[in-house]
Image (cartoon, rainbow, N blue to C red):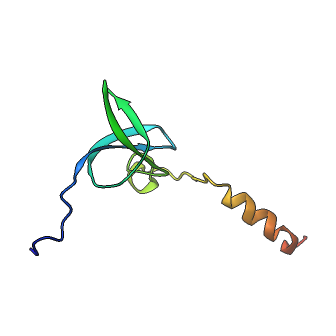
Amino acid sequence: MKQGIHPENYRLVAFKDMSNDDVFITKSTAKTKETIEVEGTEYPLIKLEISRTSHPYYTGQTKLVDSAGRIDKFKNKYAKFKKNK
C-alpha cells in the first residue's frame, strides 16, 4: 500500500436515506454542515436519495424514486411528440 495517500480524518457520520428516513452510522471523511442526533449522540449528517434499504436491487421491489421531478419534466417536454391513435 502507498503511504500518505489515505485520509487521516475519519470520524463517525450519520447517513440518512431521504426516501424512507433510514439512518445508519459509519466512518467517513465526507464534509457536511448539517448534524443529526441519533440515540442521544450528535453526528454529522449526509443525506442520500437512495441507499441499501430503498434500492430495488437490495429490496427486490421495483420502486420509482424521483426526488427532483425529472420524470414529470421529461414527460411534459416530450408530450408534443406523442403519437395520437
Q: Give the side of residue 54 with respect to residue 13, left or right.
A: right
Q: Give the side of residue 46 with respect to residue 81, left or right.
A: left
Q: Give the side of residue 83 with respect to residue 66, left or right.
A: right
Residue at point 80%, 68% (across, down) = 77
The image quadrant that residue 25 belongs to is top left
Q: Position of residue 61 (x, y in %)?
A: 48, 50
Residue at point 13%, 70% (across, down) = 4
Q: Is residue 25 above or below residue 41?
A: below
Along the line of sight, the residue nearer the viewer: 51 or 35: 35
- Report the number of numbered marks: 0
Q: Is residue 42 above or below residue 78?
A: above
Residue at point 27%, 52% (across, down) = 28
Q: Give the side of residue 29 with respect to residue 79, left or right.
A: left
Residue at point 21%, 62% (across, down) = 7
The image quadrant that residue 40 belongs to is top left
Q: Position of residue 39 (x, y in %)?
A: 31, 25
Along the line of sight, the residue nearer the viewer: 63 or 39: 39
Residue farthest right in this picture: 84
Along the line of sight, the residue nearer the viewer: 60 or 46: 46
Quarter of the image where the N terminus is located = bottom left
Q: Position of residue 53 (x, y in %)?
A: 40, 45
Q: Is residue 39 above or below residue 65?
A: above
Q: Where is residue 30 in the image (x, y as percent from the top left)?
A: 34, 55
Quarter of the image where the C terminus is located = bottom right
